[in-house]
Structure formats: C-alpha cells, structure tokens
Image (cartoon, grey):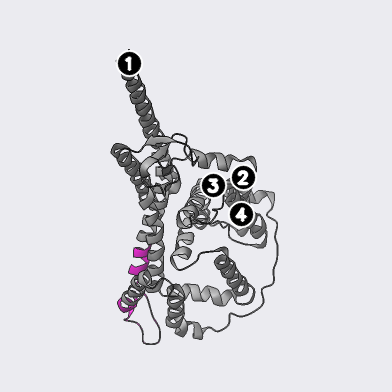
Amino acid sequence: MKAIAAVALSRNFSKEEVASAGLFVAAIIGLLSVTGLLRWFNHRIPTPVMKGIQVGVGLSLFSYAGTVLRKPEDYSGGLSDIHDQVVFIAFLGLLASFTFRKAPVALILLLAGIFIALPKLIRDPSGLGIWQPYAFVPISRSFSYEGISAGLGQIPLTILNSIIAVSALSADLLPDVPAPTPTAMGFSVTAMNLIGCWFGSMPVCHGSGGLAAQYRFGARSGASIIFLGLIKLILGMFAGPFAKQVFQDFPNAILGIMVFAAALEITNAGETLNTTGARDLMEGKDGVATALTRPNRPGEPGEELTEEMRSRRWVVMFITAGGILTFKNDAVGFIAEGPKAAYVLLKKRVEHHGAMHDSKEVEDSGQG
C-alpha cells in the first residue's frame, strides 16, 4: 500500500500506527464488500476510465523501470562495469520470450540476478533462523489522526488499482477463466490485513502490475500464486534476513527489465478498448461492435459504436492514464476523467436516441 508507506516514511510512523492504518483500510474495504457497494461502484465505472487506469499503471511502471535502470550499481567480485551489458542481455531474453513463450524467462532472470548478487551475499551469511511469531495489539492512541489519515489516502487507491482494476485485468488476460469479482477481491484484501497487521505485517493489497507480471512470465492458473505464496512462507519462516538481503542486492539491471515486461503486459490491456474484448461491448449483427445501452450486461442489444464514439473513448482513456502518470495517483486520474466519461457516454446515447426518434417521425410521415 503505497500511500500508507509514503506517509509512514515521511512522518516517521511507529509500527503501531502503520498497523492501525492497515486495519482501518481493511475495515472500510470489508464494509464496502459486505454491503455490495464495491460491486455497485464497479458497475458504474465507464470502461474507458477503467482501461485508462490500466494503461496509466502500465505507463507508471515504464517510468519506474527507467528510473531503476538508470540507478548506478556497485557490483562485487570484479563485476563493476557490466551494468549496460547485463541490461542488454536481459532485454534480449525478454524479446526471446515473445517467441519462446514456454521458456522460463522469469526464473532464468531471477537466478542470474542472484548469481550476480552472490559475492555480496557471501560476505554476510548470517540470515538463517526460525521465525518466532509475536503479536501486538495497537492501543487506542495508535488509531490517531495520523494513522487514519494515512488510511484514508490509501482507500481510493486500493479500490481502483487493487480491487476493480485487478478484477477487470483478470477478465482481459484470461477470458476463458472466471474472473474474481470485486467483492471477492475486497474480502481478500480485508482478510490479509485483518490477520497480518496483528503480527507486524506491513499493510498489503493486490495490484494489477503484479498480476500482469505473473501472466507475462507464464502464470495461467491459481497454482502459480499458491507456489509463490509457499516460497514466501518458507523464506519468511526460515530465512527472512537472508531474503531481505537478496532483495536489496538484486541487480537493478535485471529488476528494471522485469518491471518493463510487466508494464508491457498491463498497457496492452488498452488495445481492446474499442473491440468486443471490452466489457461494455459485444458482438452485434454481422460482427459489428456495439456499445451496450446498459453497461456490463452482456447479451443485451446496444447502439452501434461509431467512429466518433471510438475517438471519444480513446480520449477518455488517455486523459485518465495521463492523470495517473502526471500525479502518480490512480484516484486523481479517476476523478479527473470519470465525470467527463459519464457525460460523453450519456451525451452520445441521448444523441443516438434523438436520431432514432427523428428517423421514426420521418418514416411515419412518409407512410401518411
């Protein structure tokens, strides 16, 4: 949860205050899930805005990948001048993955990164040991203005990127597999934080960027995330400090390319904006794409998607993405473009029905 982390770092939060912010977000998301408000909110977001959120996250990941790749690195073991070469080779591996899709590119890059970081890891081998769990209860003072304000800033980000965008991206990437509903995603976020924060866990949530990365590197079922969870559990229980050191010393040259790959995948979701791959479009008569009169209800007849409407949908998507990229905030992009999107789509619908009414009058007068 980036908003909580940013506030916690800038204001020097205690563990109790960080946990209180996570518990506050979990409580609000749980309430929205139980009452069905998440599902209601999801059905009211125009598809161009949702696609804009996905593209905006992807463009942000591109920017982050560039920042990571430009960071100077201090390789050990006589490998101090190979940054550019590592970037080049990793990028070639990424390009090869487009042709050899079954090749375990992510695993190869991970092992290569650990190998490069190995000289640093050998210096400090003390990182093994069994984790001894402990629980702490945040006192009422922890739920202060600081903790709640950090949680309030996180809620819109969690709803948009961690719940609704992940649900939509799941449907885009795996159309033949039932996508998790926003309500199910909300319960998942609630459970993770209501349990983890009592044991000192940093508040966590899902993310469309992580889903895109997993899909890009071969994940196609829930077994992949179960395997990832088991690896994390084993590392956390028996080698937490060692795993932390691996992450700190992992070469930016490889990390940046892996982030770049995730950005490619999630940005590609915008490609289906004006096709039948979009959730508010369906295949009409003679294969003509149509926009549903009532969004998100597949199978109902709708109006024909004209070239003007296609153009407006692209504008809505890119302004939303631009707001996210400019302000580094999903909520800002949504607020900037959501009302306009609703107006554009409603205006077009009124114009369409007006034209249909005029056509009907002309037809009646001709018969008379």
The Cα–Cα distance between marks 1 and 2, rounded to whole angstroms, is 55 Å
Which residue lies most toward the front here?
367
Q: Which mark is first along the chain, 3 or 1? A: 3
State how far apart marks 4 and 1 are (Cα): 61 Å
Q: Position of residue 120 (x, y in %)?
A: 46, 82
Residue 79: say if magenta.
Answer: yes
Q: Quadrant of the C terminus?
A: top left
Residue occupying the point 36% across, 52% down: 271
Magenta stretch bounds: 65-86
> Disc 4 marks which residue?
188
Secondary structure type for disc 4? helix
Q: Amino acid at mark 3?
A: Ile
From what the image shows, is residue 312 above or below residue 179? above
Q: Callout 4, which amino acid? A: Ser
Can the viewer see residue 74 in this picture? yes
Residue placed most toward the observer, 157 or 96: 96
Q: Is residue 284 left or right of residue 40?
A: left
Q: Earlier in the sequence, mark 4 or mark 1?
A: 4
- Element assignment for label 1: helix
- Left/right of residue 176 with respect to residue 68 in the rendered view: right
Query: Which x, y percent locates residue 52?
Result: 39, 47
Q: Which residue is mark 1?
A: 367
Where disc 3 sits, the SS reads helix
Q: Residues within 10 Å of mark 1 (few under 14, many from 20)?
A: few
| Circle 4 residues within 10 Å: few <14, some 14–19, many ≥20 | some
Mark identifier at residue 196 = none
Amino acid of disc 1: Gln
In this figure, which residue is indicated by the disc labeled 2?
Answer: 33
Residue lying at 55% horizontally and 54% vertically, measured from the top left: 178
Three-letter code for the amino acid on which mark 2 is drawn: Ser
Q: Quadrant of residue 15?
A: bottom right
Q: Residue visible at 40% across and 38% down?
A: 291
